[in-house]
Image (tube, rainbow, N blue to C red):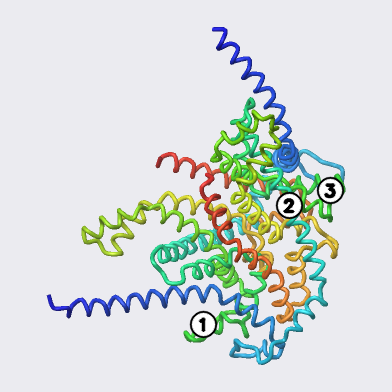
């Protein structure tokens, strides 16, 4: 008895000493997080029920007015629609291409390292530089894109200045820019599938196609689902490429949710209304994340 | 067995293989084409840029386009700003994250696991939600349009803490326990035992952070207003607005904004890819 009690007090004392150390070790992170994450999350929630132009000292409580204004604003719905079009345009295309590339690179290939670097290169360059390059590539008269299309006998549009083609141009560029990340994630997933499965299937006479659909696809599905959710989340948050490539134009045809949020917050300084938009985005992303957690749990 | 049939099959196989290589290298080339086009355009004369059909190679290499771009906008200054901010945030995160990770991996204190979970939970909060209040906090303390506005909010990271904590957990405790008996403090244990063994994880975090900050655009757009504070990304975006059709200068600017990152990436590719895979495993 005495022995256990003594060890208990000893460990308590140790715990106390560790507690002080922990506070010291965690303090820089805690200070930054409290100021720039925890406080802002609650404060923007508070703001979303208020009207406040940040340069006046007056804040007035408006209840749900910001949210109802949002739901009644036709531009908000256009922006939501644009965001969905952008998302549905980029995510499946991006995933299909990156899976294909990852699959092809998951075998003996000459120059694999070069190929991987090449496919990954667009990820690491800044969105601003990327958009500047693509603006030039999309030039209707001298651009590379329309030049390439001319070989197929297609007369390309004035990509960025026509509202029906600008979104497509944006999607194409976004796929180019982001597919490398998914390729890396798919590669990691593919390497997790044991070779013995494929070997066993080969003995049973399975061809490449059967192996892909019967082994790769089912065993990769947790990775695929994860990539899908992450891609959805990041495409809901698209901003940089939109800002530099099209600035939301022409005629608002590429204006996405975060661009709309940016305008209301930092052009019109309607901090309350912008916070309501931010919370709309937040809740959408939380739902997506919860879906993912639920799906992951049900699989394990 | 006569070897006739296998030969036919081998030819078919070779053709399939050739097709495979044509496809994958073609796709790689198409992916790289915008980069090549950017570099080549940056070396052309304006008259050569506006020709149809486009010509890939410039007749003479106009390296002076770079000097002209640097004259048209203070890219040197932009560079300095970007480097100061990216280096400061990277070093800051390495310090704060390794301290916090040490607390979560090695110290025993009440509520540790709950706090860690809360920490992980903050990774779900999108930057757009914290952006407005963060801007206001910086406005209240008068830090708008300064290095501090770009650096200080980035000085801690839940992802970085998580990454390092996972790595620290794999280091055997016996190493430190022997040192504690010799009277070594927790600080010294972190500095002299844990951190030297964690170089790969620290490199991953450093590269990830550096590239993220160097390429950041939105936050710079929001908090900066004066020209001499502009980062490379913001400078390039504004340059684009001002020199709408001077593609030679714009491409020279883009190359300038891209090259250092490409070089860093080339040498540190391994760590960067590891970081992406780890971020994929975090959920």
State which mark lies toward you, 1 or 2: 2
Q: Position of residue A54 (x, y in %)?
A: 82, 48
Any part of residue A244 in sight = yes
* Whether marks 3 and 1 lie on the same chain: no
Q: Are marks 3 and 1 in contact (CB under 8 Å)?
A: no
As helix, strand or loop, the secondary structure at mark 3 comes to helix
In this image, B71 relative to A93: left or right?
right
List the residue tagged with mark 1: A149
Report which quarter residue B117 is drawn in: top right
- Gap in Å between the C-alphas at discs 3 and 1? 49 Å
Any part of residue A235 in sight = no
Q: Residues within 10 Å of mark 1 (few under 14, many from 20)?
A: few
Q: Residues within 10 Å of mark 3 (few under 14, many from 20)?
A: some
The residue at the point 55 percent across, 68 percent down is: A176
- What chain does mark 3 sit on? B
* Whether marks 1 and 2 lie on the same chain: no
């Amino acid at each position: 008895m005495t022995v256990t009690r003594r060890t208990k007090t000893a460990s308590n004392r140790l715990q106390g000493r560790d507690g002080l150390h922990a506070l010291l070790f965690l303090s820089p992170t805690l200070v930054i997080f409290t100021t720039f994450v925890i406080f802002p999350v609650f404060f923007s929630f508070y703001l979303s029920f208020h009207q406040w132009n940040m340069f006046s000292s007056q804040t007035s409580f408006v209840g749900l007015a910001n949210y109802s204004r949002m739901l009644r604003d036709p531009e908000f719905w256009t922006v939501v629609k644009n965001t969905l079009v952008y998302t549905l345009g980029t995510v499946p295309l991006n995933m299909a291409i990156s899976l294909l590339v990852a699959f092809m690179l998951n075998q003996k290939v000459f120059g694999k390292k070069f190929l991987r670097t090449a496919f990954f290169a667009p990820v690491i360059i800044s969105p601003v530089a990327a958009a500047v390059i693509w603006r030039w590539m999309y030039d209707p008269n001298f651009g590379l894109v329309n030049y390439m299309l001319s070989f197929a006998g297609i007369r390309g549009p004035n990509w960025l200045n026509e509202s029906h083609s600008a979104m497509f141009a944006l999607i194409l560029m976004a796929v180019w820019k982001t597919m490398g990340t998914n390729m890396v994630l798919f590669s990691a997933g593919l390497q997790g599938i044991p070779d013995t499965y494929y070997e066993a299937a080969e003995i049973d006479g399975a061809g490449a196609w059967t192996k892909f659909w019967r082994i790769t696809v089912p065993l990769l599905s947790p990775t695929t689902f994860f990539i899908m959710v992450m891609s959805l989340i990041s495409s809901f948050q698209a901003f940089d490429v939109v800002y530099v490539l099209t600035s939301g134009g022409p005629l608002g045809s590429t204006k996405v949710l975060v661009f709309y949020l940016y305008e209301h917050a930092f052009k019109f300084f309607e901090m309350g209304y912008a916070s309501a938009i931010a919370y709309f985005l937040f809740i959408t992303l939380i739902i997506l994340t919860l879906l993912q957690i639920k799906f992951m749990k049900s699989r394990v | 067995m006569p070897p006739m049939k296998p030969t036919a099959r081998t030819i078919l196989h070779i053709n399939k293989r050739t097709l495979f290589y044509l496809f994958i290298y073609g796709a790689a080339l198409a992916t790289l084409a915008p980069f090549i086009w950017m570099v080549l355009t940056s070396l052309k004369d304006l008259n050569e840029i506006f020709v149809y059909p486009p010509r890939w190679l410039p007749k003479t290499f106009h390296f002076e386009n770079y000097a002209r771009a640097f004259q048209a906008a203070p890219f040197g200054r932009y560079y300095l700003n970007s480097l100061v901010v990216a280096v400061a945030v990277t070093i800051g995160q390495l310090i704060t994250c390794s301290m916090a990770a040490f607390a979560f991996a090695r110290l025993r204190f009440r509520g540790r696991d709950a706090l860690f979970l809360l920490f992980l939970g903050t990774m779900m909060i999108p930057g757009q939600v914290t952006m407005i209040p963060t801007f206001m906090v910086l406005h209240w303390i008068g830090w708008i349009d300064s290095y501090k506005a770009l650096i200080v909010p980035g000085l801690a990271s839940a992802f970085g803490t998580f990454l390092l904590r996972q790595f620290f957990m794999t280091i055997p405790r016996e190493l430190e326990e022997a040192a504690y008996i010799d009277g070594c403090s927790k600080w010294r244990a972190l500095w002299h035992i844990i951190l030297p063994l964690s170089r790969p994880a620290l490199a991953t975090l450093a590269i990830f952070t550096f590239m993220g900050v160097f390429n950041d655009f939105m936050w710079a757009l929001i908090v900066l207003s004066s020209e001499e504070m502009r980062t490379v990304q913001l400078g390039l975006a504004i340059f684009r607005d001002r020199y709408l059709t001077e593609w030679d200068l714009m491409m020279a600017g883009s190359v300038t904004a891209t090259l250092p990152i490409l070089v860093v990436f080339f040498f540190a590719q391994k760590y960067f890819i590891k970081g992406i895979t780890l971020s994929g495993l975090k959920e």
